[in-house]
Amino acid sequence: MLRAWLTNGWLRIKALLRRRQLDRDLEEELRFHLAMREEKLRADAMGVGGSTASANARVETSLAHSAARKRFGNVTLLKERCREMWTFASLESFFQDLRYGFRMLHKSPGFTAVAVLTLALGIGANTIVLSMVSGLLLRPPSVKDPDSLMIVCSKDPANVFDAVRAHISVDDYLDWRALSTVFSGMAAADFGDFSDFNVFTISGDAPPERADGARISYNFFQVLGIPPILGRSFLPDEDRPGHDNNVVVLSNDIWHSRFASDPRVLGRTVLLNGKRYTIVGVLPSSFRLWDFDAQIWIPLVFSPDDLRPAARASRNLRVFARLKPSMTEKLASGEMAAIAQRLSQAHPETNKNWGATVMSLQEYSIADANAGPALVSLMAAAGFVLLIACANLAGILLARNSARRQEFSIRAVLGAGRLRLARQLLTECLLLSAAGAGLGILFAQAGIRAIVSEFNWNAAVIALASEFTIDTRVLLLTAGVCVFTALILAIAPAMQFARRDPGVCLGESGRSATPGRQRHRLQRLLVAGQIALSLILLTGAGFFVEEFFQEIRAATGFNPSHLLTASVSLRSLQYFGAPQRESEFYESALRQIRTSAQAQSAAATSDLPFTFPGSIRFVLEGHPVAKPSDAPLSGYADITPGYFQTLGVPLLQGRAFTSSDGPASSPVAIIDQAFAARYFPGENPIGRHLQIDPTNRAGAPWSEIIGVVGDVKDFLGESKPRPHLFEPFLAHPTGTMSFVVRTRSAPAAFSDPLRQAIWATDAGQAVSDVKTMARVISDSGQGDNIMAYLMAGFSALALALAGIGIYGVLSYLVAQRTHEIGIRMALGAEPRQVLALVLRNGMLLIGAGLVVGFLISLALPQVLRAAFGGIPRNAMGILGAAALLVIVAGFSACYVPARRAMRADPMVALRYE
Amino acid sequence: MATEGELLPGTLDMLILKTLNRGPAHGYAIAEFIQQAPDEALRVEEGALYPALHRLELRALLASEWGASENNRRAKYYRLTRAGRKQLAQETAQWRRMTAAIARVMQTA
């Protein structure tokens, strides 16, 4: 058996090398046979007929040749069959098909370009989106055994947004730790979500810088399963009061950037907010905890204050826990719910009806990032694009195959089997797919690179984004879908042709008038479907794009160009509890800045616009409240004189703060227009009084409103501005302010002079977040701009694809009627009449598609509202615009080729096949 | 079932092997020998011989070489290899068994 196979192979290889010889031999062998047979027949004929000269005999002999051939069979076919055996037939015919395919594709560059581009765009777009999805959703967090690492959260009975992921108080955590049995380890962490306490100034041997930190239980890294690459994490005593708590573990990033990855960093000390800490460990570079970027980790020490009964209501901690090997998430959830209930009954004043939830770290990250709806809509958009791409492919492939009917009929007549024809089409299809997929990969790579560079609003996100790559499974899946569609569409017609009588095909294409309705029904359906799809997608895209432009267009309320900002948080001991020194620092720093020629004006504020400023409670005169928690909330900022002028916010009434509005003078406040409209409608607010933050201020003083300014937005796309209150910094100094400087030329160039000016006042303070205002605004979007770009990109893509597709197929359909047009014109019809006829038919088709698409699009605003919560403005307008676009595209698709055919000489048109 | 005069598939190979058992021959000669059965009962589309010949050669049951024919034309001669002989013996035995079985069934009717 093996021997035979070996010999077989050997013989074939030999044949491969001596191909031409083989062909000649085969030819000669068959010719020999034919010659012998012919001779024999002639000899027989002559023998029967008698003399050579008889006419009969002559006829017989001339017939001998054809008789011999007849008896032999189809010489060409037999030769091929023999040849096939010797050669690696499939390989050879494959190459043949390939060459032929190349030629055919080359001959119709328009078709090839459209097909390849369609494939590339469809595959590329989907790969990008699905890779992002799999990168974000399916990537496990970088801890040991991610499936058994849980986050335990409180469940707020009041159910105000993130109800199931609320933080935990200290006492609750300690009780949970004591009472639970399903976890092998539990650890708490304070990431400073509700205070500024976790922003540290690191100083020491290098210039001071700000870094985010976290306070953690001593066993935090054990629970997570992250061993430090250098040194150790914390010892059990280090998070207890009364012991040495001043130890710190560094993240890999800061070890790299500040300590130059020095392996001897252990044992060195750094100043954190002025206190001395010893470095005891460094974390691995692979460690990342979702969207949070903690560079320094210090022990979480509970003060007696934290353990008071009332403090049970202060929930600031996150709790991580590792499931015991035999436990499941469900069991853990059950136990924690029971424990929470016990606590609820034991401490009703703080814990009434509070619950506990357990979820895996990954689940939590996804919910936290709130990426769900955005990703889903992106996937929907990409799906649409894919659909349109497939429809495009369908349309042009069908059109093309119809055009090649004649070619296939001829080949069928010549003996090509159904399989052979199918193989030819398959090969062409594969060529197209290969080109399309290759281009698609390039497109996807470029796209992902572009997107990754947009993920830049904080360092953790940058790290996250750097792990985005093309997911090969996604690529294969998408490519597979496209290619599969193309295959089916390429081969189905071939099957059809081979089955019918080739004679019919040959006859039809040559002589027919307009092809019957039946023939093109599938194509008409496709066109109508494509039009409907395009309309839907265009409308949906239109909504997103409009939303996006809204955001961009939305006036910020001030002039954001030429503004540089920087943030300083006074953390040294000298400023602690000394408001006088704090205000002196900022005053002096501002004076320093103003001396520079570059600075047109400068001021400072406790909260920059577009950084989600805090809120404060207030009480209006004449509107007393029963409980402090009933007092209304307003946005709030503490500002130095000259703030509004620097930003370019107009002063509408009254006056701005001056340097005489200090701690000794009577309290004053400024409100913005939104505040005035809400609380003083139709009245003059100047001279009215309000109590600001009455619960926390001694004596609850009444402040007088001295001015009204224009509104400033808090976030991009805010439609109704929130009310804001402003107080003078000098009267209420705080330790964390942001500088705003209006520069004469490029703001970024002022970064260094700004730092120098601040350090000239106090060299020990860290200057952080030196950004231009434009950057602050775009960072505040937190990825909204990515979403908008992507949706806009997809829309444009879809529009382009749809346009090409519609044009292609409609052009073909119209071109098919060229023959008919020629007849009509030859019979005397006016060119105009013919044009009108063709256009009418075409537009009817488009109209059908439009109606369907329109009906479906009407439901779109509802769908978008359910997903995103925003009603698209001007929905009908967008729908109308999209419909118009489609009509225009369709019309030109009908008109151009119709006109071309109409203009042609009728004789030429008649002969057109 | 094959129509009258046509060969059952697979028997062509056997006939070729048997023919070549008598000695090397070229394709035409093989065709003539096979078709010399009375009433031209075994009418073969002559061309069909050649794919069969080539196939057998590829299976190393035949070997070929070019030589001069009776009238000094260049022709390709085929001969049985040892494997071919073995194959012929196998197929002959199988054929005999099958025809005997069929004959038995036909006789009982």
Image (spheres, rainbow, N blue to C red):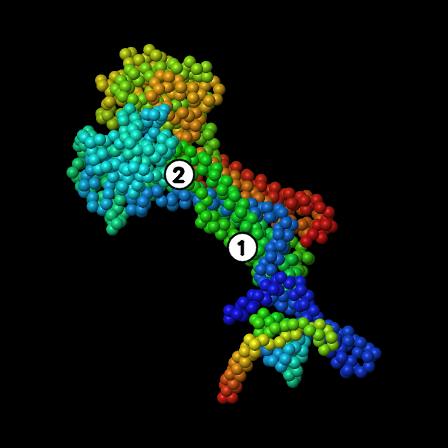
Mark 1, chain letter?
A: A
Q: Is residue A313 above or below residue A476?
A: above
- State the separation of the CA atoms marked 2 and 1: 38 Å
Residue found at x 53% / y 68%: A5
User: Could you tell me which residue is drawn at 37 percent across and 25 percent down?
Assistant: A768
Residue marked by disc 1: A487
Res A645 visible: no
| Rendered view: A855 above or below B97 | above
Q: Earlier in the sequence, mark 2 or mark 1?
A: 2
Which mark, by number, is residue A464? 2
> Camera-side residue: A778 or B90?
B90
Crowd tier of the residue under label 1, counting other residues whose Cα lies within 10 Å: few below 14, some 14–19, many 20 or above: many
- Compared across the picture, whether A639 is left or right of A478 comes to left
Dot 2: element? helix
The part of the image, by quadrant, that contains residue B68 is: bottom right
Q: Of the residues shown, which amino acid type is indicated by label 1?
A: Leu
Residue at the location (63% across, 80% down)?
B23
> Quick one: A602 or A859, which is closer to the camera?
A602
